[in-house]
Structure formats: structure tokens, C-alpha cells
Image (spheres, grey):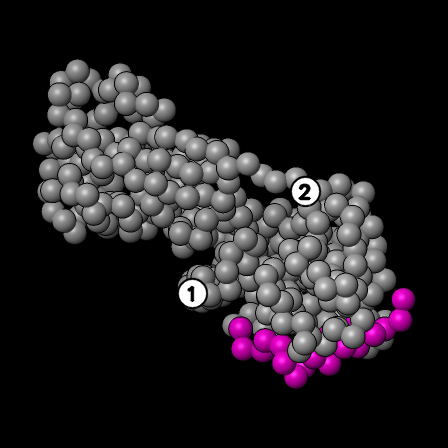
Amino acid sequence: MDGFLASQVVRWQALFGRHDLPWQNTRDPYRVWLSEIMLQQTQVTTVQAYFARFLARFADVQALAQAPLDEVLHLWAGLGYYSRARNLHRCAQDVVSLHGGAFPRTAQQLQTLPGIGRSTAAAIAALCFGERVAILDGNVKRVLTRYLGFADDLALASNERRLWEQATQLLPTDHLLHNMARYTQGMMDLGAGLCSTRNPACPVCPLVERCVAQAVGAPEKFPLKTRKLKRSVESIWLLWAVADEGAVWLSQRPTPGVWAGLYCLPLFEDRQALQLALAPSNTELLQDVPAFKHVLTHKDLYLHPVLLRLQGRHTLALEGQWFGAAQMAQLGLPAPIKKMLEAGKSCGSDHSRSDLP
């Protein structure tokens, strides 16, 4: 293939691409890796604040590796997909213990680290070290399938492999240290901006004169992926045990599972199971709080808090312990649980209010 796409993307990125994101204009693999992990399934605007907080606390990979996992999860809370945070911590530890604190310089080596897949490894290697390797995240798939007119179903692994091969053939072939970084960033910028899922800005796209999808007038038909993930629904009951001075009973969630590694109110599959876990004298004190919905990527969770007010910090026959407000401020809590506890605190003792999340 000729170098039209690569040259156009490199030139366009220099003039019109994004240059002001906090993880850009650097070849520091720590910053690029951190941003790439955070940006998985997450909007740029959301990531920016988390990225700044992480760098303020963990200035380099050594600081992150030495930190307790609970602190990492605390800073990650609200960003979702918590396995990313656990892998982030493990990856930092491996970089320090196995690689002397320096990230490997090739995509192949980077893929041996926890949480780094093929596309993320390629992004780090291309942006930081100029390696000639292709990324293929959702945005780039959209740009490439439209440009090439690649109409095969990406739900099939064989078709995705063919797209990887074509993506590699289209990469820049010279001045790689400069051009690979510019090209890789440019492909991400095109997918995030002009080549949007709906109503792409084809007239101002640098690839328009050779884009097959635009030529046939059907850019929104690309990429094709028939396998759809079905959404599911789950109801969970939460025991919201509160001692008279405001301490809350929390336990650390097991791995794997929902909110793995985070601290949470005890979870039960129904109210009866919740009641059976308590002493009979405590079940008489239970008070139902309005249920609320929490939306995950592939699942809707309906959360049913059940309040239990106790005089003093009596030990419950459950996994966990009492945490005061100062202690909870240092824990990684699931976003809906943290929001619920904060709302409960702000409205005093009236936990029956309907404006609780």
C-alpha cells in the first residue's frame, strides 16, 4: 500500500489534532501508560481529573508500586472497571521488580505486563519509542474500516486479525521516532473527532478523497460487528449498618466479583438472606431505604439499602469491621455506595428520604 494515509494523518495531526491533553507532548512511558489504561472505556473529560490526582500522589512508577492497593483503589473510585486499577498496581510492581523501574521498549515485551493488551502495548511503544506497531482501539477501527471499506464482521476473530494486518501495512515507514507518535495520536484524534460514530465530518477529513465508505455514501455502516452484548439486570440488597457515632460496617469485596477489592456495605441476593445474617434482635431494627438504580456497562444494578442503626460498635457476625468517617475517606468505595453514604450523612438521620441515590 502507498503512504497516502500515513502522510495525511501525520500532517493533519500536526495542524489540527489534539495537543493540549495532560498526557501528550511527552515520551514518558509512565504517563502514557497511565493515560492509556484510564482511557479504556472512559471519556477524556472524565480521565483528566483522575490523571492529575494520580500524578500528584504517584509521581512515577516506583511511587505507584510502593503504594498500598487500598490507596490506589481509593483514588480510582468512581472511574469504574476496577480490574484496571488492580492491574495498574500489579503492573507497576512488575515494572519495578522485573524491569528495574523502566518500562520495556517494545510492544511484545509490554504485553507481558498485567493489564496491557495488544493495542495498549502498541500505543506505548509507538508514542514513546517510535516502534512501528499498529493500535486498534474502537476509534481506530472505525477510521480504518471506513477508509478501507472493510465490510467483514469484526465479531469473527479471523476478520479482526486481517484488519490488524492491514493496519500494520498502512503505518509510516520512515522517521519512525517522530512519525509513529504523530500518526498514532492522529488516528486516535480522527476517531474521537471527525470520524465519529454518527454524522462524521467527512468533508473536512484528510482521508476523504480515498475513503471507500464516504465514496459509497455509507460511512455509518462501518465497522460491522454483529455480536451484541446483552444487558442484564440484577438486584442486590445492602446492609447499611450505622453505629450511633456514625461509623459504618464495611467489608472488602472478593476478587473476582462486582466491585472486587473495594470496601462496600455487605451484599445479599435478597432481603431474607440479609435478615438471616443478623441476630434476631437486630432484624427488628431494620428499616428499608428507597432502592436506586446503578448502570454498569452491560448490567443494570438495582440496589436496595436496608438500614440498621445500632447503639455502639457491636460486632456483627459478618465479614468486615466498623469504619469512621476519617477512615472511610481513605478507602476505595464503589461510586454509588460512596454517594449514598454521603447523601445519608448530609440529610442527618432521615435515611428514608427519596432523594437518596
For the image, the number of numbered tags is 2
- Percent coordinates x, y for residue 318 in the rendering: 29, 24
The span shown in magenta is: 1-21
Q: Is residue 97 left or right of residue 156?
A: left
Q: How crowded is mark 2: few (under 14 residues within 10 Å), some or many (20 or more)?
A: few
Task: Single out the residue that lies furthest toward the front.
Answer: 217
Q: Does the image show residue 167? A: no
Task: Single out the residue that lies furthest toward the right.
Answer: 1
Q: Main secondary structure of the magenta part?
A: helix
Q: Mark 2 points at which residue?
A: 226
Q: Mark 1 points at which residue?
A: 49
Distance from the alpha carbon under mark 1 to that under mark 2: 35 Å
Residue closer to the observer: 198 or 257? 198
Q: In this view, does 337 lie to the left or right of 132?
A: left
Chain-order first, disc 1 or disc 2: 1
Residue at horizontal 62%, vertical 46%?
Answer: 114
Q: Is residue 311 left or right of residue 26?
A: left
